[in-house]
Image (tube, rainbow, N blue to C red):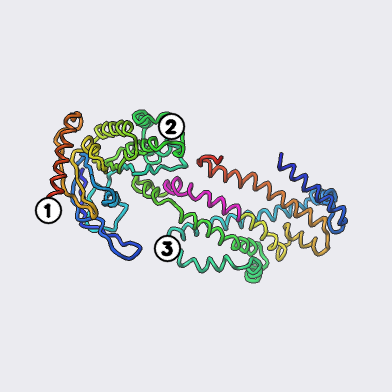
Amino acid sequence: MLRLLSFALFLAIWWIAALFVGGAKLPSPPAVLQVMIAEASSGALFLHLGATLARVALAFVLAMSLGSAMGYLMGRVKLADRLGDPWLILLLNLPALVVIVLAYIWAGLSEAAAIAAIAINKLPTAIVTLREGTRALDRSLDEMASVFAMPRWRAFRHVVLPQLAPYIAASARSGLSLVWKIVLVAELLGRPNGVGFEIGVAFQLFDTPRLLAYSLTFAAVVLVIETLLVQPFEARANRWRPRAA
Amino acid sequence: MRLEVEISGKTFRSAAGGTHEVLAPVKFALRSGEVGVLIGPSGCGKSTMLRIILGLDHDFAGRIARPPEARIGMVFQEPRLLPWRSVEQNVRLAAPDIADARLAELFKILELEAHRDHYPGELSLGLARRVALARAFAVEPDILVLDEPLASLDDALAGRLRDEIATLVASRPVMTLLVTHSLDDAVRLGDRLFFLSPRPARIVAEVPIGLPRDTRGEAEIAAIKTSLAQRIQGDRTERDVS
């Protein structure tokens, strides 16, 4: 209810601002909605949105699985940590734009290059978060599993994974927001479709209603995924904790 | 089946760079059906010794001989339950093959029936200790290790849990190693008592108790305790003189 109210407030402010600034710079909500409907009925909106979502999903899964595995390894094995740390610092501080441009130059303006570039941007933060999580693992529970001769997989699943779950959730959440941002840049620079491409076109034509129509639809999709996927996962991972007052 | 412990020494390197001797040479053996008790002052190295016997610490001089297929049941000083798994899941994860009837029986003995679906965070320390006991017994261990399982519990509860341990130990052939600093627990549960010196720990006296556990009444227990107390006192004066 409160969420709806705050959304209504946002719309009201937008509308009033649109009246003051004028339709060319800031179109009113109905004008944007009109463009949205037109784009949706032609199918273009879904095509571009679908292309972007597919890229996000692929890059996200790639970065999360690789990053989690590498972070776990670096948290457990000192040698891996020592070897990997300089690379990690380099990757963490490399601007996203550099990665994307280099990927397109080296691998061509291809889908693989775009997805790899997005994944590489997300990879180091996933590694860092999971490494911290692994370092914080409770040694005494590891000992318990070892004394009771729990098979490796069972110990990993029931002893280690639940301890890592909050870190995985945190990494997924921050990672998703990072990927949302970077995917548009990658599309703007080198893909012939996707929300980023459309925003690029709208920018060249100074077509603000179109720009807003695409970015707001995109934002709505992000919001839905957050509430329907990320938040329930976090809640599930923390189910056993005594509820905060 | 036999557990042989023959540690010739264990040193520990501190962060400051010095080396500390934690264990002096220690040698003892335990047979199936026997309850051995390690008694010693706090910080004497009992827990280190247990970690070595359990195979958690390999950095020591000496050898531990235990049957390689021996199942170990352990009650740690802190219950060490998985907070994200229910009481029943905690037990089943350690003992996946346990029959439902046996699990029900264990929960009944330890009065945990009402708590099967609770998470460890919702339990008192006494209850969590009982879950840890249930888990250790559920694996049908060949070697049972109890590290101060009754510490920081009130006397009534400690007494009941002690009786439960005695019942469970009697119900199957198992080598039990109990670590405690309570002479009372030691005399009530033990078949052989090993008195340890302060750090670095060595065995100052090995005392067998001839009387079977179930025939020890209050009078016998009191008598054994008195004679033990005198003996420890004697050892101390002797050591002080020498």
Quadrant (top left, top right, bottom left, bottom right) of the C terminus of chain A: top right
Disc 2/disc 3 C-alpha distance (Å): 41 Å
Quadrant (top left, top right, bottom left, bottom right) of the N terminus of chain A: top right
Residue B224's place in the image compared with A16, above or below, is above
Q: Please, what is the three-letter code of the amino acid marked with disc 2?
A: His
Residue A223's place in the image compared with B85, above or below, is below
Closer to the camera: disc 2 or disc 1? 1
How many marks overall?
3
- Chain for disc number 1: B
Q: Residue at x 64, y 55 (%)?
A: A177
Q: Please, what is the three-letter code of the amino acid marked with disc 3?
A: Lys
Q: Please report the bounds of the magenta region as a residue range.
A: A153-174
- Chain for disc number 2: B
Q: Which of the labelled discs sits on residue A62, or is there none?
A: none
Q: Which residue is mark 2?
A: B115
Verify whether residue B94 appears in magenta: no
Quadrant of the image occupied by residue A233: top right
- Same chain for mark 2 and mark 1? The answer is yes
Dot 3 crowding, Cα within 10 Å, few <14, some 14–19, many 20+: few
Q: Which residue is mark 3?
A: A78
SS type, badge 1: helix
Residue B223's place in the image compared with B3, above or below, is above
SS type, badge 2: helix
Q: Which residue is mark 1?
A: B241
Q: Residue at x 64, y 44 (%)?
A: A228
Closer to the camera: disc 2 or disc 3? 2
Q: In the depicted view, which residue is nearer to us: B195 or B106?
A: B195
